[in-house]
Image (cartoon, rainbow, N blue to C red):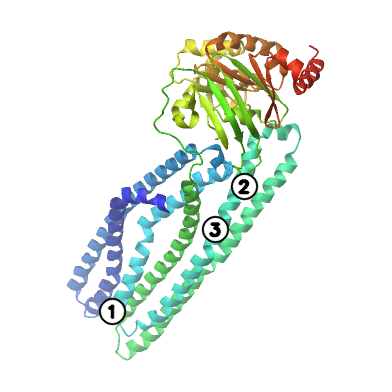
Amino acid sequence: MNFLKKYINKYWKLFCAGVSCLTIEALCDLMQPTIMSKIIDIGVKKRAIIYVERFGILMLLITAVGAIAAVSRNIIASTVSQKFGAELREDLFVKIQSFSFDNINNFEGATLVTRLTNDVTQVQNFANGLMRIFVKAPIVCIGSIIMAVHLNYHMAGVLGITIPMAGILIVLNMKIGFPLFMKVQRSLDKVNSVMREYLTGVRVVKAFNRFNYESERFEKANNELVSVSTTAMKVMSVFSPGISLFVNLGITAVLWIGGNWVSHGKMQVGQIIAFTNYMTQILFSLMMISNVFTMFVRAKASTERIGEVFALENTMKFNEVSNDTSEVFGRVDFENVSFSYEGKNGQAVIKNVSFTCLPGETIGIIGSTGSGKTSLVSLIPRFYDGTSGTIKVDGIDVKDISLKNLREKIAVVPQKNVLFTGTIAENIKWGKENASFEEVIQAAKISEAHDFISTFPEKYDTMLGQGGVNLSGGQKQRVSIARALIKNPEILILDDCTSAVDMVTEAKIRKSLKDYSKRLTSIIIGQRITSVMTADKIIVLDNGEIAGLGKHDELMKECSIYQDIFYSQIGKEGI
């Protein structure tokens, strides 16, 4: 809950202004029954028209003041709650952006989406309600009790029985409702997760005709949400009628007892009407308080889920001030580096790896699936931190370089290409926001993307759907390479980024990159041996360890694993 302090400190003045308007509105409501009783017991009973007119005008003025206060608090509440919700959502998004991959792995993508949307909305609605009706309910309730006691303290004994019974129901409402609504939010996470997975893999679903399977998955998650939500609402629905029952019994008792007292001259009719009105106000207030606590438990559940994100400390420590004063550009050193996704006590996927990549060199990395190739290069831009050993860029430990400076030196083309909604030119400019159109074309030519882009009617202004859905796999890879090249990095990491490209196009890309990469360090991960065999140095990984290191000819003589890869692929590809 500590994350809320920022917003409390920022908005407490406006909040108090909203509550002040709400308090004025509540006081105006509380004055009406008493004035009405005086009009009946004095003005009507004694036929004093002037008295009735005077107090009637007073009631109108009080109503007008209450209306102005209501409009003011509505404006203030809406403004504050919307700004609060927008800031909270943005801060949560920024917090998620700051997470390392280790942190993000603690949450499913769907639950983060739910927390950014539904959970923030629950908290925002509660903040809005606090300034609109939630504070008004207890004010009216307490005020009605005070006014009722002042009106006739003998009759107030009815309240001594009614209010405690309603209070017990409200406490039970809060105690039982909180765990139920936590389950509702978790079930909503599951629905979002299933839907997100389906939309991400819709082509695979269609290709394998797995509609029934996906429908069953969604139906199961959806039914679970319905079941949990229904259970929660059923349980919560008991409390409001229960409160209504007790208060209405109290009103019945007031009418019955008050009728007897009027007939014996102990009470006036106007007082009974006023007392009944106060009991009705108490009823609505208690009903509202019950709804407040229902919304409170939902908001509390959502607040805790949001708080879990804010409370999560980044597993990686960053230097805000970089110690990078090196005059070397593009050198990479691995010194006895080991890495595990589960920390120091977990199973290592990289084991005691040491090598040096000099400026201008091209390093090829090859190995079987799961040998640790992608994990190895992910340590260079600090997507993860090694569990032991040292990684240096330009002769400096990456932990001593500010993250911004480190990643400005490096461009990565990941194994899974991700493009964004927008034009092809805008996607390429992700690598360099202020790049000229000539730079965009140059990068596209090097990545062999220019030719196919030129065939589109709108060329570089062609709009891409989400994830580049209207491009083929090979086209997406080439646009991704162009996006990395336009950055003009010191270190270029290509993670099996030509796997969807035909052999001829891959050869052209390799040639263009060889000419381009004379001034930068290239690290190329390949599944095809043709992707790496011309590299200055080839690293053969096997189960997270270096099984071979050298040029192609050297490895063909000395490394059996490399020989096996070469012979199996050359035979398969007919080279």
Label 2: how many residues lie within 10 Å, few (<14), some (14-19) or many (20+)? many
Q: Which residue is mark 3?
A: 181
Q: Which residue is mark 1?
A: 151
Residue at (43, 34) in percent of width and height: 319
User: Which of the two marks, 1 or 3, is nearer to us in this view?
Assistant: 3
Q: Which residue is under mark 2?
A: 191
Residue at far bottom of view = 264
What's the amino acid at mark 1? Leu
Which residue is at a point 45% across and 38% down the rendered structure image?
Answer: 94
Residue 263 seen by the camera: yes
Name the residue located 57 percent from the left edge and 36 percent from the top edge.
388
Secondary structure beneath dot 2 equals: helix
CA–CA distance in space, label 3 to label 2: 15 Å
Q: Report, in whole angstroms, how far the alpha carbon at label 1 lies from the one at label 3.
A: 42 Å
Viewer-closest of 287 and 466: 466
Q: Does dot 3 land on a helix, a strand or a loop?
A: helix
Q: Secondary structure at mark 1?
A: helix
Amino acid type, residue under disc 2 in the picture: Val
Return the disc, 1 or 2, that comes first in the chain's sequence.
1
The percent coordinates of residue 236 (x first, y second) are 53, 65
